[in-house]
């Protein structure tokens, strides 16, 4: 019911969205970034937990995304890079690029991190973490990059990001074949991310569990006994992640296998310690495309500013500011 109340203002919002103008890129020194105040940009956000569409000032929404998506303990330049990525994500959707608004009843974005970007309110952040200082640090990162976005060929990019690359990021088409190649979402070596607890995880399954998950998802699945011959990695992507894998008579993509077993990444090794157990060690956390958040923090610690961090992970992009 709440949704209906928001439909009318949404209609007007779609009309008054300002166009994005191409401007000169910001200089490499972050002090040179010209800040343009633009208080009129508002975004509609579908919150599936509450089943409502809420409207926010863009910068307030971006603050909530950075708070939900990156630890405040990360380097301030990493937080700024995250803010620019979150803002670019939001504005690109507001301009009808990349995402489907059908899943949000017409809202620009949603708060489901698997579909759009995670988001948390200030109240919830403070009650969950109770740290006003941390929230202020996030807010500063957003303010310091106000109106700064990423473009490629004059168009807002699709700034995908993930938690930890495990050492190398992934080509977008290896994860989403349908997207095809995207010049700025190319695999790059990332700095050492092994100091982060998102780097390596071991998960232990029983063969029975894997078999049950397989049979639930694929009704035509057939598996024989002798299970260690029934799971076989068929091919790897250029970045070393699993591209195709077979379980019994079912061949699936790495991302499908990741989803089946709820794994952290497709950069993985499988071993069979005994006759009933399957051990899977994954490296990295997330789909691996675009910016690695842990890598951004590591680059920040080694002296990169937010613009350099973004240019590192998104090949050939420009970091620019928007003007009305
Ligand atoms: Zn969404």
Image (spheres, grey):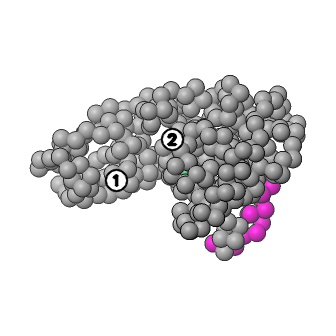
In percent of width and height, residue 41 lies at 77, 49
Q: What residue is drawn where x is 68% and y is 30%?
A: 155
Is 267 left, or right, of 30 in this rendering? left
**The residue stretch that appears in magenta:** 128-142
Q: Which residue is mark 2?
A: 288
Q: Secondary structure at mark 1?
A: helix
The mark tally for this picture is 2
Name the quarter where the C terminus is drawn: top right
For marks 1 and 2 on the same chain, the one whose residue lies earlier in the sequence: 1
Q: Residues within 10 Å of mark 1 (few under 14, many from 20)?
A: some
Q: What residue is drawn where x is 77% and y is 66%?
A: 133
Disc 1/disc 2 C-alpha distance (Å)? 17 Å
What residue occupies the far left of the structure in this picture?
A: 225
Label placed on residue 261: 1
Q: Main secondary structure of the magenta part?
A: helix
Residue 301 covered by magenta stretch: no
In percent of width and height, residue 210 lies at 25, 54
User: Which of 162/51 is in front?
Assistant: 51
Is 245 left, or right, of 89 in this rendering? left
């Amino acid at each position: 019911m709440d949704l209906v109340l928001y439909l009318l203002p949404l209609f007007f919002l779609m009309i008054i969205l300002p166009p994005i103008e191409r401007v000169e890129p910001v200089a490499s020194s972050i002090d040179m970034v010209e800040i343009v105040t633009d208080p009129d940009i508002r975004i509609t956000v579908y919150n599936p937990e509450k089943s409502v569409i809420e409207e926010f000032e863009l910068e307030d929404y971006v603050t909530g995304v950075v708070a939900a998506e990156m630890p405040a303990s990360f380097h301030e330049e990493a937080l700024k890079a995250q803010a620019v990525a979150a803002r670019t994500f939001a504005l690109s959707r507001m301009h009808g690029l990349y995402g489907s608004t059908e899943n949000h009843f017409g809202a620009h974005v949603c708060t489901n991190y698997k579909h759009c970007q995670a988001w948390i309110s200030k109240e919830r952040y403070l009650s969950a973490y109770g740290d006003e200082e941390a929230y202020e640090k996030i807010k500063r990162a957003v303010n310091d990059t106000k109106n700064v976005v990423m473009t490629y060929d004059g168009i807002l990019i699709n700034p995908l990001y993930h938690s930890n690359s495990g050492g190398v990021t992934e080509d977008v088409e290896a994860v989403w074949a349908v997207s095809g190649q995207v010049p700025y979402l190319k695999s790059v070596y990332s700095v050492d991310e092994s100091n982060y607890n998102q780097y390596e995880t071991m998960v232990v399954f029983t063969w029975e569990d894997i078999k049950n998950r397989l049979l639930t998802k694929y009704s035509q699945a057939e598996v024989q006994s002798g299970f260690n011959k029934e799971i076989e990695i068929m091919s790897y992507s250029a970045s070393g992640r699993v591209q195709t894998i077979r379980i019994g008579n079912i061949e699936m993509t790495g991302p499908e296998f990741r989803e089946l077993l709820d794994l952290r990444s497709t950069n993985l090794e499988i071993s069979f310690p005994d006759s009933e157990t399957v051990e899977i060690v994954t490296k990295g956390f997330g789909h691996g495309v675009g910016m690695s958040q842990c890598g951004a923090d590591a680059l920040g610690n080694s002296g990169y500013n937010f613009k350099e961090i973004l240019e590192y992970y998104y090949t050939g992009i420009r970091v620019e500011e928007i003007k009305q």
